[in-house]
Amino acid sequence: MGWLSMAKDKKMIRFFLSWMRDRAPFLLGYVGFFLILLMISQVFNLERELTRYVLLLLFIIALLTSLVDLLGQWRLVERILHDEIVVSSNVAQVTLQERLAQVSQRVRELEYQVRQDREDLEDYYTMWAYQMKTPIAAGQLLVADLEAGRHKQALTQEVFKIEQYTGLVLNYLRLQSFHEDLLLEKAELGGLVHQVVKKFSIFFIQQQISLELGNLNKILVTDKKWFSLLLEQFLSNAVKYTRNGKISIYLDGEDLVIADTGIGIAKSDLERVFDRGFSGYNGRLTQQSSGLGLYLSRKIADQLGIPLILTSEVGVGTEIRLRLKQEQLSLD
């Protein structure tokens, strides 16, 4: 709580300095008046004891008046900061309060409008994503009826990508209400990894990527759907930028490692790969990056409480570590 105390102290200092600047003419007037009285007593040789008594009395009155004004202004500022209605006879304060009320009302109206626009946009894209499921399913059935061959494999890949990108939009929207959709339960890591890998099997075959699965024997408490989506994003990236190479998935202590021997990520891009909309050099090179995948991954990982560590070298590959160490949890 120390930083709260420091912030309050700084606020009080700023208020006091502001009050001093605002009341400077009056304070200087008090000092000038005292000096004039002192000079008059010296010039006319007035009784010193009486002069000191009068000056002390005036000083006490000035000090008490200033303290009362200072405390009054502080209470006024506190009430305004807490959005309390303040009635004042000061014309400047009344004008300022009216202006602040108008600005506050305008801000609330704009916030409401932005919230409505965002909800409308979310509703539109949610509807769009669900409507896309029908033609995607139809496309999958049509592709399944084709004779086996190079063209069928290529079409299967493209339909799969359309499904993935549509799901990416839908999951991006769902992320806004993450905690309402959260279901924590015990899950077997190996089973989740195998399910995700199976979805990408056609890419491993067509792009001649070898898969190496190490030890995945671990029970964790997580949301299976969101954790699987997290794995999908990283595996999708590994497959997208790896050809005739290898993807390895294994446990290293408490870390789940997903490593590939793909084209890697430029050093200049590493600090921004998790930024929304950032596609980097690889995205511009392959024209396959939406700039949402890794951003969504970071968001999901943060919500699940899983730290991420990404390392990469151009021409060598990329490694992502998911820190799965958890405190002992009990589920009802």
Image (cartoon, rainbow, N blue to C red):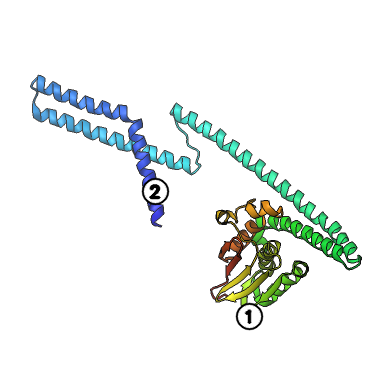
On the image, the x and y values in percent for residue 97 come to: 50, 33
**Marks 1 & 2, CB-CB < 8 Å contact:** no
Instruction: Say what amino acid the circle numbered 1 marks.
Output: Asn
Give the structural element (helix, strand or loop) at label 1: loop
Instruction: Bin the neighbour count of mark 2 within 10 Å (Cα to Cα): few under 14, some 14-19, many 20 and up.
Output: few
Q: Above or below — where is 13 with respect to 228?
A: above
In the image, farthest residue toward the top = 44
Viewer-closest of 323 and 212: 212
Instruction: Bin the neighbour count of mark 1 within 10 Å (Cα to Cα): few under 14, some 14-19, many 20 and up.
Output: few
User: Dividing the picture into quarters, in which one does residue 219 lie?
Assistant: bottom right
On the image, the x and y values in percent for residue 184 come to: 64, 70
Q: Residue at x 34, y 37 (%)?
A: 17
232 left or right, relative to 55: right
User: Dividing the picture into quarters, in which one does residue 145 lie?
Assistant: bottom right
Residue 8, numbered circle: 2
On the image, the x and y values in percent for residue 228 come to: 69, 68
Viewer-closest of 296 and 269: 269
Q: Nearer the viewer, mark 1 or mark 2?
A: 1
Residue 217, numbered circle: 1
Q: Residue at x 13, y 28 (%)?
A: 51
Q: Earlier in the sequence, mark 1 or mark 2?
A: 2
On the image, the x and y values in percent for residue 227 come to: 66, 67
Q: Tell me, yes or no, if residue 321 can be seen here.
A: yes
